[in-house]
Image: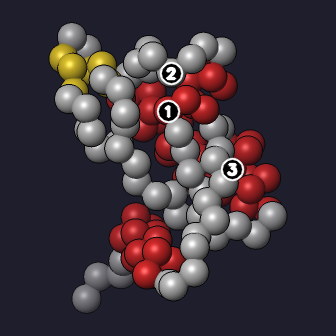
Amino acid sequence: MTSPTKSTTMTRRLRELLARPQALMAPGAADALTARLVARQGFEAIYMSGAGTTAVRLGMPDIGLLTMGEMADNAQRIDRRSLRPAPGRRCRHWLRRGDERAPHGARL
């Protein structure tokens, strides 16, 4: 039997946290530094938003300027630094990948 990957382990952990009867506090982190600070405070999960990511990376409002690749890159940086599960989120705006447009609700 193969050992679980970090991704499957974190997915399983997030599902366990969400299955508990109490609310899950998942503070927002827009970058890796903030994610480390959140993790040091003992929170069990971290939330990444498009608005926060766009504000930190571009200093602009979230109007769909970042590509899906840039959002995924930011999520990976947060993941590597926090060691906490991050709830998957659905993007609420159009994501650009080259000339292609992903529909509302595209998974990140």
Assign a secondary structure to mark 3: helix
Cα–Cα span, label 2 and label 1 = 6 Å
**Position in image of residue 39 (x %, y %):** 72, 61
Give the class, few, some or many, for how many residues have Cα within 10 Å of label 3's Cα (few <14, many ≥20).
Answer: many
Residue 62's tag is 2
Mark 2 or mark 3: whose residue is earlier in sequence: 3
Q: Dot 3 corresponds to which residue?
A: 35
Q: Residue 97 is drawn in which quadrant?
A: top left
Type of residue at label 2? Asp
**Position in image of residue 96 (x %, y %):** 30, 19
96 on left or right of 65: left
Type of residue at label 1? Gly
Residue 50's tag is 1
Relative to residue 79, is residue 66 depicted above or below?
above
Q: Residue at x 35, y 44 (%)?
A: 90
Residue 34's tag is none
Whether pointer 2 and pointer 1 mark residues with C-beta atoms closer than 8 Å, the reply is yes
